[in-house]
Amino acid sequence: MEYCVDAARHPLLERLNKLGYGLIADGLPSRMALFSEYVESISLDCSAGIQPEAGTWLTSLRGPHIAENVPDPVLFDACRAEGFRWFSGEYPLLPSSAVTQKDAISRGRLLKLLELVSHDADAPELEALLKQDPALSYQLFKLVSSAAFGFSAHITNFTQAINLLGRRQLQRWLQLLLYARFPGDESANPLLPRAAARAAMMEAMCQQMGGDRDEQDRAFIVGMFSLLDVLLAMPLRLIIEPLKLPQDTLDALMQRRGRLGRLLDVVERAEYGRIPLRHADLVAAGVTPEGYCRSLIQAYRWASKVSHEA
């Protein structure tokens, strides 16, 4: 902050700006101080709420602005309304008060669809269930038509969407849709990027370890489903029981056991930071430090793309 309001530092800020750096001020200036013209964004600690004078600065600078340590979904929505676009904090891990009965019904159908897909149900049976929910149909067409998986064809019917995606990708889209908000919701579900990153990270680490395609798919499912209890505010066991998942997937989700369970433990340790992720933890999970870093970059890139498309 001192650098951003100190006129003697402006030449240095100008040089950084010309080199292509975006300058972010950590906090707000005092009442009479002014930011350098090269400051584009603000980062604020919002753990105790939004400072009253923040709004003026957020609208006067280009952004994107960062809200740090956001504690809950209510403050997350308030920060979005105020003009913040980047966030950190534990807010995704608390159930949102915005979850409605309509959301629960749609997600119930999604879980049913996942069960049908996992048991190789015929396309007409899948289509019949999709047609019962306009919001679900909208989200499926929107996501299938997006650039996240590289498809450029126009989707005109359910059968085409199912055939184009294939069962493997359809299952993944349905898993993502569990975390998506439906039309009429005020904001994107903050759990979507976190769940997507977990799933992609699990899959990438499994691949680094030499897992075959089927095990990579199960790793992806473990990462994606590991936050369903937060999403639906109910015990995970009750949510996944009807899906008849493979035993190693159940062991990983419920007890953090087996190879997939150890990978999920690595992902959670890295994500929360409460129990530091050590080199020994990677070794125990069968992941090299280089493989972990490559997986992390791949996962965040994919999660970012998916979140923008949702």
Image: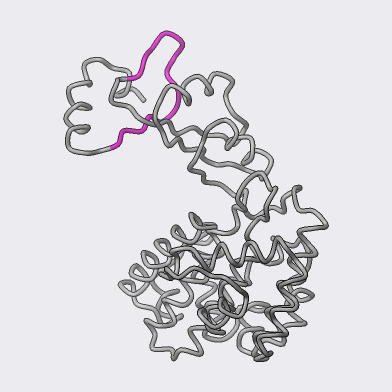
Name which residue lies at 45% across and 65% down. 148
Q: Quadrant of the C terminus?
A: bottom right
First to last magenta residue range:
22-35
| Numbered marks: total | 0
Identify the coloring. Answer: one colour
Instruction: Left or right? Give the position of 1 relative to 78.
Output: left
* Viewer-side residue, 54 vs 292: 54
Instruction: Left or right? Give the position of 215 relative to 238.
Output: left
Query: Quadrant location of residue 168?
Result: bottom right
- Where in the figure is residue 121, as x and y percent of width and height? 68, 90
Instruction: Left or right? Give the position of 281 relative to 122.
Output: left
* Viewer-side residue, 303 vs 137: 137
In the image, farthest residue toward the front: 156
Q: Is residue 220 magenta?
A: no
Query: Quadrant location of residue 156?
Result: bottom right
- Where in the figure is residue 232, as x and y percent of width and height? 74, 62
- Where in the figure is residue 77, as x and y percent of width and height? 64, 40
Q: Quadrant of the N terminus?
A: top left
User: Measured along the vertical axis of the image, is residue 83 above or below residue 196?
Assistant: above
- Where in the figure is residue 22, as x and y percent of width and height? 30, 36
